[in-house]
Image: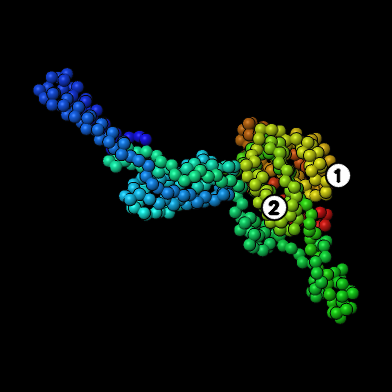
Amino acid sequence: MKPSRLLIQLLLAWLLLGLLAAVATILEWPRSFEIKLVFWCWFGLVAILALLDRFALHRPRLEVTRALEPHLALGIRQRVGIRVSNREQRRQEFWLTDFPPSKLHLEGLPIRLTLEPGEHVDLRYSITPLQRGLAEFGQPCCRVLSDWKLWEKNFYYGEAQSSKIYPNYKPLFRSSFIGSDQLYLDLGLQLRQRRGEGTDFHQLRDFRVGDSLRQVDWRATARFHKPISREYQEERDQQVVFLLDCGRRMRAKDGEISHFDHALNALLISAFVALRQGDSVGLLSFAGQSRWVAPIKGRFQVSRLLDQIYDLDSSPAASDYLDVAQQLITHQPRRSLIILISSLEPQDRDDLTQAARLLSQHHLVMVASMRQQVLSDTLATEVVSIDDALRYCGVANHLQEQSAMYAQLRSDNIIVADTPPAYMHSTLINEYMALKRSGIF
């Protein structure tokens, strides 16, 4: 409980009277006694009113319920509903607010309400998640004014709730209701499934112009007395396992979003596409929090991945690629496509090469590295001073050593993708689909 603005104003007026009474006493004004009398009467009146109003203030019978989604998407503005009902037999005036965590940006509260007896109101305010993890909401708060508006007191109603802040999963669930071609178009990919090509037999159909002679099924042609072609599709029921680096290099930022958040978005979108292709998807995180999600197929696997990675974050730990390769061999003996998502530097060459060679003995390996935009910007900047020249030469030497590392990995039959963070998802999907169509995977 705290004094209201009205009570503070009354007390300020009393202090001004006190100051006037003090001046009157010092200067020996003829009406100084009357001023002192007004001063003490004012004090007594305000004190009595404040005490009576204080003891008359009670917890009003209000009913407050909050409608909160159990899952929130990072960076997406979403709405929270609150219903307030007045169960008292008289009008209630109060301020309503809520207490979301600091990782959320709130708009639309507090708000002042006036409810008649038995009346209820439905409100909505906006929240924008700024950080992944568990968001814990406190109880909604009603700041109630006393009858004479001399006091304010906070009363809490409803229940505390929590919600998980996931990476931006909204596009994935919208894409669940559209076809593959439209999905690829929405993702900015130029992918089309070529009918009749692939490794798995799909169906027999009439011969079409453009079909190769290899597709002709001669037995079916003789049986039906017309040309019949075999149609193939990409092989299904394969396994894809993502190795997600949670090390310190993933804390770098190009813009407002960190490389780690870009990696999570790329992982989710790529996993969603792979699941739509009929493959199983799994995950192993390392260099920080180690989490293993066994490869499973089906649309519910995206939800399982979200539950496992929503509170993951990059850590100050160094990335040990050889150690995670040994862990993966223990977890995943079946041949799979292993996609390592990291931010690689030339000093990782020896450790990364050993890890890739170890994994390639059992699996098909793809290394996806996030290219730092600051390096490209430095090369594009005009050189006008010695410092600029030294910086340019340092970046050029760094990129040359990085290219040599990638060349060595490719010589070991490792697939390498080096791309800016914002385009990582399209690069991964293009490489994945190319492998599916080639029959290598």
Judge from the rendering whether residue 433 lies leftward or rightward of residue 423; answer left or right.
right
Quarter of the image with the N terminus in it? top left
Q: In front: 348, or 47?
A: 47
Q: Judge the density around disc 2: few (<14), some (14-19), many (≥20) Cα neighbours within 10 Å.
A: many
Question: Circle 1 sits on which residue?
Answer: 361
Determine the residue positioned at 55% across, 43% down.
Answer: 135
- Amino acid on which disc 2 is placed: Gln
Q: Position of residue 144 (x, y in %)?
A: 36, 42
Q: CA distance from mark 1 to mark 2?
A: 27 Å
Determine the residue positioned at 47% across, 52% down.
Answer: 81
Q: In front: 19, or 62?
A: 62
Q: Position of residue 128 (x, y in %)?
A: 52, 47
Q: Position of residue 307 (x, y in %)?
A: 65, 47
Q: In front: 303, or 106?
A: 303
Number of the front mark, 1 or 2? 2
Query: Upstream in the sequence, badge 1 or badge 2?
Result: 2
Residue 408 seen in render: no
SS class, disc 2: helix
**Residue 258 against residue 296 in the figure, above or below:** above
Determine the residue positioned at 56% across, 46% down.
Answer: 163
SS class, disc 1: loop
Question: Circle 2 sits on which residue?
Answer: 301
Q: In front: 236, or 404?
A: 236
**Residue 109 against residue 204 in the figure, above or below:** above
